[in-house]
Image (tube, rainbow, N blue to C red):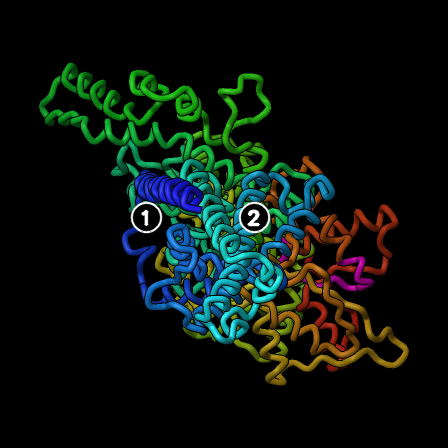
Amino acid sequence: MFALQLFAVVIGLAATAIGWTFFINRIIRFVRYFKLGAPTVEGERTNQPSARTVTLLREFLGHTRMARLPIVAIAHWVTMISFGVLVLTLAQATMQLFDPHAVLPLIGHFVPYEWVTEFFAFFGLLGILYLIVVRQLNKPKEKGRYSRFYGSTFWEAYYVEFTILGVALCIALLRGAEYVLQTRTGELTNGILHFPFFFWIGELLSGASTGFIEAFIIVVALIKLLISYAWMVTVGITPTMGVAWHRFLAFPNIWFKRYPDGKTSLGPLQPMVSKGEPIDFENMEDMEEDASMGAGKVEDFTWKGLLDFSTCTECGRCQSQCPAWNTEKPLSPKLMIMNLRNHANAKAPWMQAAQQAQAEAVPPAEPGPDADKKEKKAYAKALDEYNSISDPHANLDLLGTLSEAAQTEAVRPLVGAQDVEDLTELGVIDPDALWACTTCGACVEQCPVDIEHVDHFVDMRRYQVLIESAFPSELSGLFKNLENKQNPWGMAQRKRMEWAKNLDFEVKQVGADIEDLGETEYLFWVGCAGAFEDRAVKTTQAVAELLHIAGVDFAVLGDGESCTGDPARRAGNEFLFQMLAQANVEVLNEMKARKIVVTCAHCFNTIANEYPQLGGNFEVVHHTQLLNKLVRDKRLTPVAPAAGEAVATPVTYHDPCYLGRHNGIYTPPRELIGSLPGVEYREMDRSKEFSFCCGAGGARMWMEETIGSRININRTKEAVATGAEQIAIGCPFCRVMLSDGLTSEQAEGNASDGVEVLDVSQMLLAGVRRGQGGAGATAVEPAESPS
């Protein structure tokens, strides 16, 4: 017995020292690593600390971000809490190496503590068993790329799961053995009171001798310590082990999220920042030569970006909801974050060496105004040498001090084709994956640890567009049209009012009919699609007629309106976005705009959420919100079809990503559809937060979809499968994509010719017209298309 105890004490204390050393060392190195990232705007991630703390506690204790998979969330919650609650069992196991009868000082046999310990040990054991089963049932071997664990590092997941399982089993066995000892020695008169969940294990062991039970406790306690500290060593030497590290890094990642109140990091894109300061595009000549324009190398991401990458737990929830991944494209948000994490950690030695060398180097003094050409030339050369410190392709001396693996990662491009023969030229992110993103936000919405995928992807696009000029060829035409004609279709500004020609009432135009918007209640922002795209013109006319019928005083800007800049910004052309947005903000402020109603979800998001970044603060409503209010206020009254006409028309609704996920507007469109007599509403399986993208966001509207199946076809199939005769939408981009998808499905014989795609406003107008004794058509005849 003594020999066993001595062996256990030596091995246990050694494991304890080694485990904590590796673990604490990695935490210190993590802090240094995160500091390698670029700074964020001062105060941006630390404002409202109390609100951030409340958000952290809510997401942590309430598991609000995990609740989308309820049973998994419960199992994970118990397992997560048990990790913290049961940490004291490490101390008790260490004491039991010296004395099998040992209990924690002060706590002793305190009944509430024992109940809490056994509760979380028991249900933590059940929880991890359930999570193991979930992983097994969703293995890629069975489901291929449609498994959310496709691409995850399985050995790491298995190791973490079986570590938790092993520790929970050890606690159960120890509690059972303690029950035997403590009832035999008379310490406890009511063993079941103190061992509510594991007394039965003690009963199974009750036939063994006291000496055996004592030796059993020592052995199991040692096994528990070895499992725990082996885990600490493993995670200490594996910083990319997100499935383990997220249980620590999730806390700061949630606390530092974009919005202190807990909203997901969607809606507006963050302004482009260099060295912690927003880039001033109006004074670009004053910009420093080494200013970063987006993310061209991994160190261009902020420290929050590096924290995001390290926090990824590889759960695959983002991947399972991604429209690109679900249509066989190379983009997986999870795999992109994992690739960035692995690359950043591998490149960290270079980043640290370059940072140190930069700190020790002395920047050359700029020559005075009277300097001759020779002095200026010498200065330019010295400046190039100074700047080359951070460029591994130029600073070969510094590069040579690193390991071969670090050298490879140091020169590896952040974005680059991944099918070339020379492996050293493989990019971290494949361009096809980067440009497949629709910025729908499903990844951000689903992520349980608040990773901000969309911001990181767009930052990489910004660098590709503004610095590398490397982007899909179709975007050249888009950028040219936006720059020269202020709309994506390249139409003349004078044609922006042609949609109103066939209306039987006059639409007031600012500058022509009224001096400014102070004379009206609403500015009706028509948008480029609403003015130029045939199908969207019907929506524009329907909304205008409904506002007219309801007696809403509104006006339009006409040819004074330009593209909001949404497609430019999400394609990475921040400079073009700023140009368009600043011009619009100036016009809106000059025209005294207060309340704006828009039919395009992208225009809604840009004006409401991004124009405030440029000094444009307006009250913006989506047309479905305003029309729903007008119906509730009885200013619009839809009437059911007359007897003999079709009744109970089945209708389904597609949530636009930039109205739903990005802005949380789900109820008004559904209420509006529900107010229509003679409608039978049918919800699609993927709706609201889980809605599937139409495929047009992120400037994908102007890019060809040549890889995998088409996103709009995937969504159209789902809509048709509901049996709906009308597919209701609330965004012109969605209308184009779903209309095209429906046409394709009808041509293939997969959808009835009677199915149609309509904006909610057209459906409302049909009912309102019936009440007025007018035409019963569901769609407004469009003006002659300028296209």
Between 21 and 732, the residue placed more toward the observer is 21
Q: Position of residue 9 (x, y in %)?
A: 38, 45
Q: Earlier in the sequence, mark 2 or mark 1?
A: 1
Please identify the quarter of the rendering in which residue 156 is found. top right
Residue type at mark 2 is Glu
Q: Residue furthest top?
A: 374
Mark 2 lies on residue:
161
Q: Residue furthest bottom?
A: 634
Left or right for 566, reference 728: left
Q: Say above or below: 494 vs 516.
A: above
Q: Position of residue 248 (x, y in %)?
A: 42, 51
Between 493 and 229, the residue placed more toward the observer is 229
Mark 1 lies on residue:
40
Q: Which residues are magenta?
A: 719-733
Identify the residue shown where x is 77% and y is 74%. Answer: 679
Residue type at mark 1 is Thr
